[in-house]
Image (tube, rainbow, N blue to C red):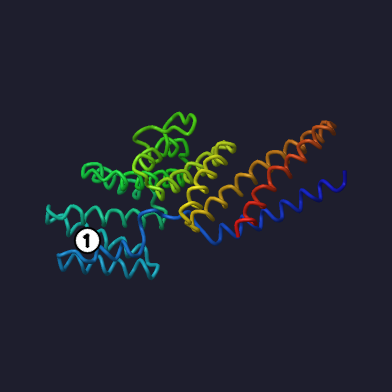
Amino acid sequence: MERLPYRIRRVWAVLFLTTLTLCLWLAHPSLTIGRKGIAEIATAKSPILTQLVQQGLKLYQAGDIQEAIKSWQAALFSSQENSSNYAEKISIRTYLARAYQQVGQIPEAIAELKQVITYYRQTNEPIKVGRMLTEQAQLYISLGQHRRAVTILCGQNQINATCNQDSAIEIARHHSDDLGKVAAWGSLGNAHRLQGEYEQAIQDFERSYEIAKRIDNQTYMVSNLNGLANTYANLAKGNERRAEFAKEISDKKAAQKFQQSTVGTALPAVMRYSSSN
């Protein structure tokens, strides 16, 4: 009986270090926004617009996000003078959304993405719509609006992994967008985990992981392992609390059962991470 609490402490130590390492190494990856994409806007025909975008790019890369936002806001204002360059405006709005996210202005980021999604729907670019929906869902998750994120990613009722037709997951599936599927399933797993729906979260993360493994995307493989580790940790904590309560009411049999469950739920995450690296 004395060995079991020691095993639990040992599992918790390993799981904590694993999760901490993953969290420090990797934030949730973005599907659509990166330095290369930002730099591509600098090919705009207007000299003023080009200058403002390049200036914002330099500031963004230097870590001065607020000043980058000002430059891109000015670029957006400059682009309003020419109604023919609507695609350039959408590109700038996309990067403004990322910059707003970086400084915690989530409502502003969501507002920009809504316009971007509307544009891609109008221009019949479904893969971009799906990917942007996933980024929008990630923003709602950061606001604690997990149910809203689930609706965007899959729909109200997820039955047998079937999602609504206009959801991020179904769009990615219908158009064979593996990267979109990886990001959407992983984001859905995170939303379910934060709602306390751990079994569903594990299924979501595992779906995302298997696709990431098939396409050999190391970034998303690690991201999903991180999600699985956190989910198993949440399950283990719940069992630990139940074990403590059982001890308080002198139910030794139940206490032992929950202690064993704590080990049983935490170990798979550690073993899976270890076998994949």
Q: Quarter holding the N terminus?
A: top right
Residue farthest along the right direction in this orientation: 1
Work out whether residue 56 or residue 37 is closer to the camera in this orientation and state it: 37
Find numbered disc 1 in the image and state the secondary structure of the residue it sits on: helix
Question: Measured along the vertical axis of the image, is residue 253 above or below residue 106?
Answer: above
Residue 156 lies, in percent from the top left, at: 43, 30
Is 93 on the left-hand or right-hand side of 195? left
Residue type for callout 1: Ala
Residue denoted by label 1? 75
Answer above or below: position of 215 versus 187: below
**In-front residue for pair 232/54:** 232
Residue 159 position in % (x across, y down): 48, 29
- Position in image of residue 53 (x %, y %): 25, 65
Residue 58 percent location from the top left of the image: 32, 70
Q: State left or right for residue 84 relative to residue 128.
A: left
Q: Quadrant of residue 101?
A: bottom left
Q: In the image shown, does 82 or 163 lie closer to the viewer? A: 163
Q: Is residue 260 left or right of residue 21?
A: right
Mark 1 nearby-residue class (10 Å; few <14, some 14–19, many ≥20): many
Write down the quadrant of residue 157 in the picture. top left
The quadrant in which the C terminus is found is bottom right
Name the residue furthest front: 214
The residue shown at (42%, 43%) is 140
Residue found at x 42% / y 45%: 181
Report how many numbered discs are placed on residues in the image.
Answer: 1
| Residue at point 65%, 41% (across, down) | 235
Residue at the spot x=45%, y=44% of the render? Answer: 143
